[in-house]
Image (tube, rainbow, N blue to C red):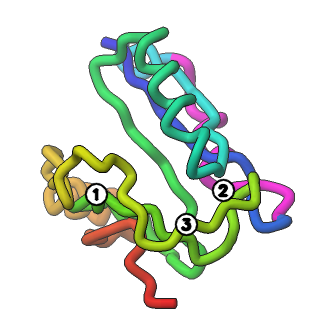
Amino acid sequence: MRILVTGFDPFDREPVNASWEAVKRLPDEVDGAEIIKVQIPTSFARSGEVLHAAIVEHDPDVIVGVGQAGGRFAVTPERVAINVDDGRIADNDGAQPVDVPVRADGPAASFSSLPVKAMVAAMRRAGFPAAVSNTAGGTIH
């Protein structure tokens, strides 16, 4: 099994991004599964291209995207991915889209196929703070 795990590069003048710091510390193998670690640029235009290239190159069985959410103090698996780019701040390329579909031909949203509630329960049993997150953002500006 091949598991692609992604984290982001630093943004907003921060020296590090906690998502990439966590991902790069993962072992290269877990229970016989190869762990492939890829850093994604904090760029509305380039992030999808880099992720797609990593998928084509590595042909993973599973993809886990790790992100940084300032102010959250728990691991928060996402229940829904919404099809909108809406930047609270400019990305590392200076772009700050507002209400732009990520994919014009895509659905408005996609639900995770993962058992997020069971994942949260397991993390809590293991002593980690965890909660379900309905979306990665949705902040009103």
Say which of marks 1 and 3 sits in front: 3
Say which of marks 2 and 1 sits in front: 1
Q: In front: 78, or 106? A: 106
What segment carries the magenta color?
14-28
Name which residue lies at 48% across and 9% down: 57
CA neighbours of label 1 inside 10 A, class few (<14), some (14 to 19), many (20+): some
64 left or right of 67 in image: left
Task: Residue 93: give its label.
Answer: none
CA neighbours of label 3 inside 10 A, class few (<14), some (14 to 19), many (20+): some
- Residue 74 in magenta stretch: no
Q: Secondary structure at mark 2?
A: helix
Q: CA distance from mark 2 to mark 3?
A: 24 Å
Q: Secondary structure at mark 1?
A: strand
Q: CA distance from mark 1 to mark 3?
A: 17 Å
Could you tell me if residue 128 is visible in this image?
no
4 left or right of 27 in image: left
Q: Earlier in the sequence, mark 2 or mark 3?
A: 2
**Rendered location of residue 2, percent (x, y):** 37, 15
Residue type marked 3: Pro
Q: In front: 27, or 62? A: 62
Q: In front: 67, or 28? A: 67
Name which residue lies at 44% across and 89% down: 140
Residue type marked 1: Ala
| Residue located beneath label 3 in the image | 97
| Residue located beneath label 2 in the image | 18
**Rendered location of residue 83, percent (x, y):** 30, 58
Could you tell me if residue 15 is visible in this image?
yes
**Rendered location of residue 26, percent (x, y):** 57, 33
| Residue located beneath label 1 in the image | 81
